[in-house]
Amino acid sequence: MKKEKLLHEGKAKKIYATADDDYCIVEYKDTATAFDGLKKEDLESKGILNNAITTIFFKLLEEEGIPTHFVEQLNERDMLVKRLEIIPVEVVVRNIAAGSLAKRLGLEEGVPLSKTVLELSLKNDELHDPMLNQYHVYALELANPQELARMEELALRINSFLVDYLMSRDIVLVDFKLEFGRYKDEIILGDEISPDTCRFWDAASSEKMDKDRFRRDMGEVMEAYQEVLKRLQQ
Ligand code: TMP
Ligand code: ASP
């Protein structure tokens, strides 16, 4: 299948229609953004690495019985996916305090959370992705209770699987963000799972192997993404 009309251009990906309405093509760009696009830079090959990393994760999740939009990797930058109606609710799963949670609750980064934390936020850059609870989700009719329950169940299952899998590759899964969508009356996982959308720390040194290196000007961003891919391919 090949790319037809450009349907949407996001900060890190472009979405193209295909001849079949049930499918679209995701093109992973090299653009890296942070702070709702305030900080922006091209990182050479980021798109290639995120496409490869997301492909590995989505294949593994499918094998685990988790429904995803992934169909196949078409080439270095393009992925064929099911065309979802995206639910504009970002689901963040956290195992260890970091980033905005550490800041908001005054916790030191790296403190393990005694129970997995699940957060919801509205996918809206202009409003800076404000946090939502279930009442907001229903009041704004973003998803119904059955859909939200399914999203949360899948998010926790994905977390359980990925924590163990990544630990076997000497990577700690600190936290990550998921997006879900509707496809033929089913809720399935969309978007990507990559160092852009997860916090990965080296198990031995706690060194950051994700987009925090870009957000915090730590350098060696693509080297870290490359190392994640290398460990997943081992
Ligand atoms: P946070 O600590 O900044 O709220 O981020 C939590 C997780 O969500 C982290 O793994 C990075 C990811 N994330 C995104 O994928 N997109 C975003 O826009 C933000 C703010 C975070
Ligand atoms: N995705 C957000 C942005 O592009 C921020 C982030 O990931 O930190 O601005």
Image (cartoon, rainbow, N blue to C red):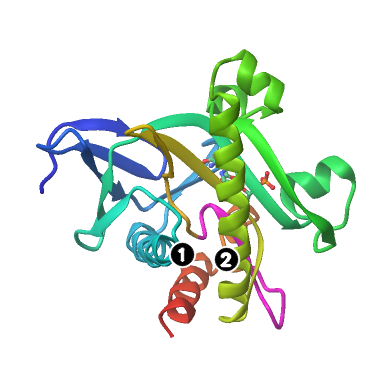
The quarter holding residue 137 reads top right
In this rendering, the answer to whether 177 lies above or below 225 is: above
Q: Amino acid at mark 2?
A: Phe
Q: Amino acid at mark 1?
A: Glu
Q: Residue at x 44, y 80 (%)?
A: 230
Residue 121 is situated, as x and y percent measured from the top left of the image, at 63, 32
The residue at which mark 2 appears reads as 161
Magenta stretch holds residue 73 = no
The residue at which mark 1 appears reads as 64
Q: From this viewpoint, is residue 9 visible?
A: yes
Mark 2 is surrounded, within 10 Å at the Cα level, by few (under 14), some (14 to 19) or many (20 or more) other residues, namely: few
Residue 70 is situated, as x and y percent measured from the top left of the image, at 32, 53
Q: Give whichever of 158, 80 is nearer the camera.
A: 158
Determine whether the residue tagged by mark 2 lies in a helix, strand or loop: helix
In this rendering, the answer to whether 125 lies above or below 215 is: above
Mark 1 is surrounded, within 10 Å at the Cα level, by few (under 14), some (14 to 19) or many (20 or more) other residues, namely: few
The residue segment tinted magenta is 195-208
The quarter holding residue 132 reads top right
Which quadrant is home to the C terminus? bottom left
